[in-house]
Amino acid sequence: MIIGLTGGIGSGKSTVARAFGERGIGWVDADDVAREVVAPGEPALDAIGEHFGPEVIDQDGALDRAALRKIIFEAPEQRQWLEQLTHPLIRERIIARLENIQSGPSPYALLVSPLLFESGQAVLVDRTLVIDIPIDMQLSRTLERDGVSEANVRAILDAQMSREERCARADDIIDNSRDIAHMQHQVAQLDQHYRERLSS
Ligand code: ADP
């Protein structure tokens, strides 16, 4: 069984995934995988460099994300080119990681993805779990974590799926608006629920 864990920026996806991890549950972070497939030495990075030119590669030979973002923001068809290159690679690697977890001791696996519903990755999972907090809390927790500007976070919030729509699509929801203990209690209950589903 694979559980897709999602939520908006700063909702607590990583924090909740770690809480499942403490209970012996393995997870794959789709954002980590997305970064890995364009790391130095990966064929996708070479293809990106050839397509967009040296200005998207920084001095250390890594992807200059800001430069690439600027290009694809101004030319949407370039975003499409990039996604056609990277999405199948990301998907393949996610599937391999999930299979690896499922061949180990973890009774089920989590796929942690901010864009679970938007990216089509939801087809990879059996159930979805949304981490939910009010928007003002998303804003304050993200600002505290990242030290970025409020306008920056608001732009990301505006581009993401609405809280209502995400929750409407969820099989399960964790309310992460209170303290860590309150979140951990819900994780324990869900973990038990998932284990029971597997054995029934
Ligand atoms: P996401 O992965 O969804 O972007 P994080 O797990 O990084 O979110 O959480 C965002 C920030 O909020 C982090 O700094 C984290 O430590 C903090 N956080 C998460 N859950 C709680 C909570 N229940 N109470 C207080 N702070 C929290």
Image: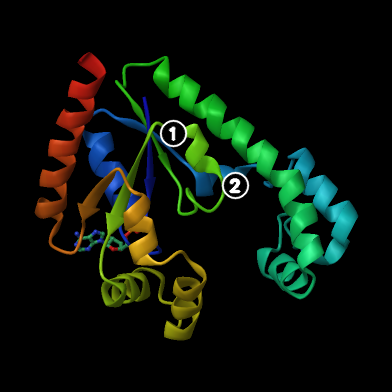
The quarter of the displayed image where residue 108 is located? top left
- Residue 3 against residue 142 in the figure, above or below: above
Q: In this view, does 129 lie above or below 49?
A: above
The residue carrying pointer 1 sits among few (fewer than 14), some (14 to 19) or many (20 or more) residues within 10 Å by Cα, namely some
Mark 1: which amino acid?
A: Val
Note whether ligand 1 is within 8 Å of mark 2. no
Disc on res. 53: none
Residue 140 shows in this picture: yes
Q: Residue at x 53, y 41 (%)?
A: 121
Residue 52 placement (x, y as % from top left): 86, 61
User: Vertically, is 188 above or below 39?
Assistant: above
Q: Which residue is drawn at 46% across and 48% down?
A: 113
Q: Nearer the viewer, mark 2 or mark 1?
A: 1
Residue 11: x and y in percent read 32, 61
Badge 2 crowding class, 10 Å Cα cut-off, few under 14, some 14 to 19, many 20 or more, is some
Q: Which image quarter holds the N terminus? A: top left
- Residue wearing tag 2: 34
Q: What element carries label 2?
A: helix
Image point (45%, 54%), residue name: 114
Q: In which quarter of the image is residue 20?
A: top left
- Kind of element beneath mark 1: loop
Relative to 11, is 141 above or below?
below
- Label 1: which residue? 125
**Ligand 1 within 8 A of label 1's CB?**
no
Name the foreground residue: 123 vs 15: 123
Count up the numbered dots.
Answer: 2
Ligand number 1: quarter of image = bottom left
Residue 125 left/right relative to 15 = right
The color scheme shown is rainbow
